[in-house]
Structure formats: C-alpha cells, structure tokens
Image (cartoon, rainbow, N blue to C red):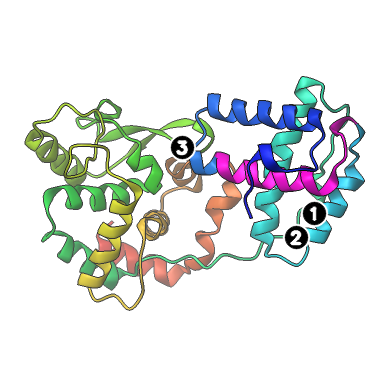
Amino acid sequence: MEKSCEIIPNYTERNLEVLNLFIRKLKLDDKGELTIKKYKACLGRFLSDLSVPLEKLRPEHVRIWLSINYDDKKAATFHSVFWILSSFFKFCLAKGFVDRRLIKKRWLPPTEDRIIKYLTRSELAAINYHAEKLPLRERVIVEFLLSSGCRQFEAQNLNRKDIDIKNTSAIIEGKGDKTRTVFFSTKCALLLQEYLNSRTDDEEALFINIYGKRASKYIYFKVVRNLGKSASLDKSISPHTLRHTYATHMLAKGKSINFISKQLGHEDLNTTRVYAKILTDDVIDEYNRAMGW
C-alpha cells in the first residue's frame, strides 16, 4: 500500500527530511508523476520498515530487507526495487547523508529470459493492410512506431520541432532524459507531412487528441490494440509489440546490433542481443525475401 511520506510513523525526522529532498530532486529532474509515486512508495516502505537513521544504515540492513521482501518475487520486481534503492543511496552518498555504499550489484538475481512478442511476416502484412483504412493520425502513429522503434512514451512526448521530415529523423528524449536521433521510413515522412498540413492548431505536440491537446498514453494503446483486432490477429498487441517487431525486422535485414541499439535507446548491447536469439538463419533469409530488404 502506497503511503504519503508525511503519515508514515516510523521515520526518523532526519530520514523524512532526506527522503523529501530526494523526491524534490526527482521533480527537478522532470521525472514522471508515476515514477515519482513509485519511488516514494518503495522508499517510504523501506525507511518505515527499518526505522534506522540513515547515518547508521549498513549494507546488511539493506540486504536483509531485500531478502525478506523480494527473494520470493520475480527477478524483474527485485531489479526494479534494487535500482530505486540504488538511486536513493547514490543521492545520499553524494550529499554526505551516508558514508559508504549500501547496495551491491552482486545481490541482483539473474533475470528470466523474456518472451519477445513481435509480428510475423503474415501478421505484419495484415497490420499494414488494415492500417491503410485508419484515419490519418492513427496511420501516422502506427507507421512511426513501426519504422522508428520508439517507445510509446517517447512518441507521446514528441513535439513538432523535434521532427525533421526532409531527413526522416526525430530527436527523441528517452529513458533517463537522454536524447538520441532516430530515423523513420519515407512513407512515415509523407504521412507526417500530410498530417501536419492538415493541422490548424498551434499546439506544439506532434500527436494530438480531438481537443487539440497532446494525445494521451491511452490513445496509443487503443489505436494499436484495435488495429490488431481489425487484422484478426490471434494475440493482443501493444505499442511495444511494434517496437519488438522493428528490432526483429532490422536484424532480419542485416542491420548491426550497434545500429539497432542506438535506434532503440539501449545503453547495454546485451539488451538488444535478446532479439538475435529469436532469429535463426532460415528465418532471416525468409524475412529478407518476403520484405524485399
């Protein structure tokens, strides 16, 4: 249960002060509201459970707390909590609130192999066919996600000024507020130009809703989900399915892991290499023939 910092009874006054300083830093760093809420709840529980002043905190306190609460949880959940704590402790160390490193990477459990959901050749053909029947904005959204590999929130945060139609590129602000340049298809560029020419508003957002404001996360998921239903796919799809499809097809085309990693905004090449595991030589040859790449 998420609790406000102000009502958790077991904080020391100093711990509360430091936590609020950290939350303030997250806000200054323009972290999302949901991200801040998640950090606040996790750190609130941690500090409340231990009731140990930060200056007296030791690595064994942290390890025991993680073990009690998360050893029986999925590795992904453990990792999520671990990195929240790590971020907080890094802040505390930099500010002098603690005098040592309190968390160690060797505690991290191995992650499970993820099941990558992507569109097969026939599924992609069905998606492209039915996408042609969509309203212009929806067509642009689908083509942009498919041809750029962007995350949903990255597309949502795009502004008109971030798009370079002539060079088929966009400046993306990704995870950790890191910017990168991504490229999209010529088809996407043509659709974007048509879409922008049809706009009469002065809203800076690239994709807008019927009220002329920035399109919400819900719109992206609704567009992709409904398109999958229209195409009679036997699985549900999301914007992230299109991202996985992009990565898989780029590998099939023979693009390098480095190129794909940069497009996707991955800091670790191993994160990108997971896509290579699902492509055998036969599948790659089939994709190249079928896609004309």
Q: Position of residue 208 (x, y in %)?
A: 22, 40
Look at discs 3 and 2 and give the one toward the viewer. Answer: 2
Distance of label 1 from label 3 (alpha carbons): 29 Å
Say above or below: 111 vs 41: below
Q: Is residue 99 visible?
A: yes
Q: Who is closer to the viewer here, 151 or 209?
A: 209
Pointer 3 residue: 174
- Cβ atoms under marks 2 and 1 closer than 8 Å: yes
Pointer 1 residue: 66
- Main SS, magenta region, reads helix
The image quarter in which residue 285 lies: bottom left
Taking the spot 62% from the left edge, 50% from the top edge, the residue there is 2
Q: Who is closer to the viewer here, 68 or 7?
A: 7
Compared across the picture, whether 88 is left or right of 229 comes to right
Tell me the quadrant of the picture where the N terminus can be found. Answer: bottom right
Q: Who is closer to the viewer here, 263 or 282?
A: 263
Which tag, 3 or 2, sits closer to the chain's start?
2
Residue count near mark 1 (Cα–Cα under 10 Å), binned few <14, some 14–19, many ≥20? some
For mark 2, give the secondary structure: helix
Look at discs 1 and 3 and give the one toward the viewer. Answer: 1
